Amino acid sequence: MKIGIYPGTFDPITNGHIDIIKRAVLLFDDVIVAVTTNSAKTPLFSIEERIEMIKDSTRKIKNVDVDSFHGLLVDYVSKKEATAVIRGLRATSDFEFEFQMALINRKLSNNLVTVFLMPHEKYTYLNSSIVKEVATFEGDVSCFVPENVNSKLIDKLKTAC
Ligand code: ADP
């Protein structure tokens, strides 16, 4: 059983993340989308809200599970007995950070394999921060995120005002 873990902040999940998940399920028997905290980011959505949005938007994709974890990715990977960690590479700008993370994780756990997947080029400029930025100013982000995420964003930003 090949398990792939796709870790990230997913605040919120975008069509770029979904593109990576769809590619990952072709390589693994089970893909776990693992929501985690990132000390460098202040999230808009709680972990529970993020999990719910991911579950809703991946319902039609087979062999996807959604979970969350705190602490080191290497510990989570070994707990799940996963084969590899999946990360998305949008552009060369992602490379340096992803390269550093993959090497640090391999230093912490020699067996850890990181697999990089490239999304369709139409998603290479997309990230959760830009989606939140546009939505904050009531811009239309419906072509960047699944429908359920679009309505959650509108609700969230309304209540934040
Ligand atoms: P993190 O805070 O760990 O970077 P993100 O939720 O921003 O978490 O992203 C999780 C993973 O998904 C990262 O590997 C990131 O490069 C990738 N990713 C984010 N947006 C896209 C996108 N538009 N296309 C492909 N991969 C993406």
Image (cartoon, rainbow, N blue to C red):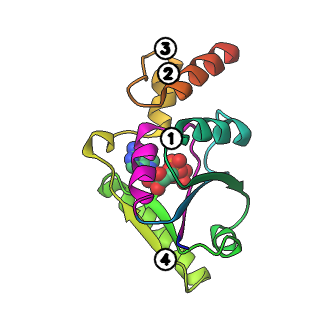
Residue mark closest to the camera, 3 vs 1: 1
Q: Which residues are magenta?
A: 3-26
Residue 18 is a magenta residue:
yes
Q: Which residue is mark 3?
A: 138
Callout 1 amino acid:
Lys
SS of the residue under disc 1: loop
Is label 3 in contact with label 1 (beta carbons under 8 Å)?
no
Decide if ligand 1 comes within 8 Å of the CB at mark 3.
no
Q: Is residue 73 left or right of residue 21?
A: right
Comparing 83 with 76, the one in front is 83
Q: Which residue is mark 2?
A: 135
Q: Position of residue 94 (x, y in %)?
A: 38, 56
Residue mark closest to the camera, 4 vs 3: 4
Q: Is residue 116 left or right of residue 46?
A: left
Q: Which residue is mark 4?
A: 113
Callout 3 amino acid:
Glu
Residue at left offset 33%, top offset 41%: 123
